[in-house]
Amino acid sequence: MMRKPQKPPEGARLKETADMVAWRKEFEEMKTEDHLAKMKELGLDEEDLEEFKEMQSGKPIESELLGAGEEDEKPKGTKKKAKK
């Protein structure tokens, strides 16, 4: 009886295979227009393409989605527990 292959934990680095090295080299040499064309071929919509453009420009998407960095945040205070 063969065991089912176990998935690596989310965010874990994959092993460096020859295919992975070749893919990374090709990916790094591609221009943004080539990336966008390839992503359209894969079926991504315009919203996904815009998100990719923002990611390539260095704009942090997570902070935009979470609303982090807004100036109207109130400073957090600490509460003291009353002793009984």
Image (cartoon, helix red, strand yellow):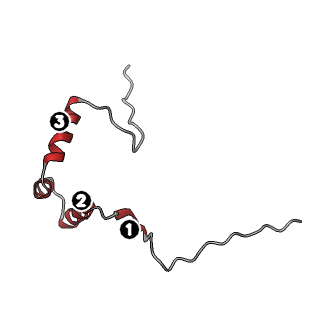
Q: Which of marks 1 and 2 is nearer the N terminus?
A: 2
| Front residue of 77 and 47 | 77
**Residue type of the residue flagged with mark 3:** Ala
Mark sitting on residue 22: 3
Q: Is residue 34 above or below residue 78?
A: above
Which element is circle 3 on? helix
Which element is circle 1 on? helix
Rate crowding at label 3 as few (under 14), some (14 to 19) or many (20 or more) other CA atoms within 10 Å. Answer: few
**Which residue is located at x 45 percent, y 75 percent?**
70
CA–CA distance in space, label 1 to label 2:
17 Å
| Residue 65, percent from left and from top | 38, 68
| Front residue of 29 and 15 | 29
| Residue 16, percent from left and from top | 28, 32
Q: In this view, does 71 lie above or below 78?
A: below
Q: Name the residue under label 2.
A: 56
Is disc 1 in contact with disc 2, using a CB cutoff of under 8 Å?
no
List the single residue furthest toward the bottom: 72
Q: Mark 3 vs mark 1: give the one in front.
A: 3
**Residue type of the residue flagged with mark 2:** Gln
Which element is circle 2 on? helix
| Front residue of 32 and 36 | 32
**Which residue is located at x 15 percent, y 53 percent?**
42
Mark sitting on residue 8: none
| Quadrant position of residue 12 | top left
Q: In this view, does 23 lie above or below 55?
A: above
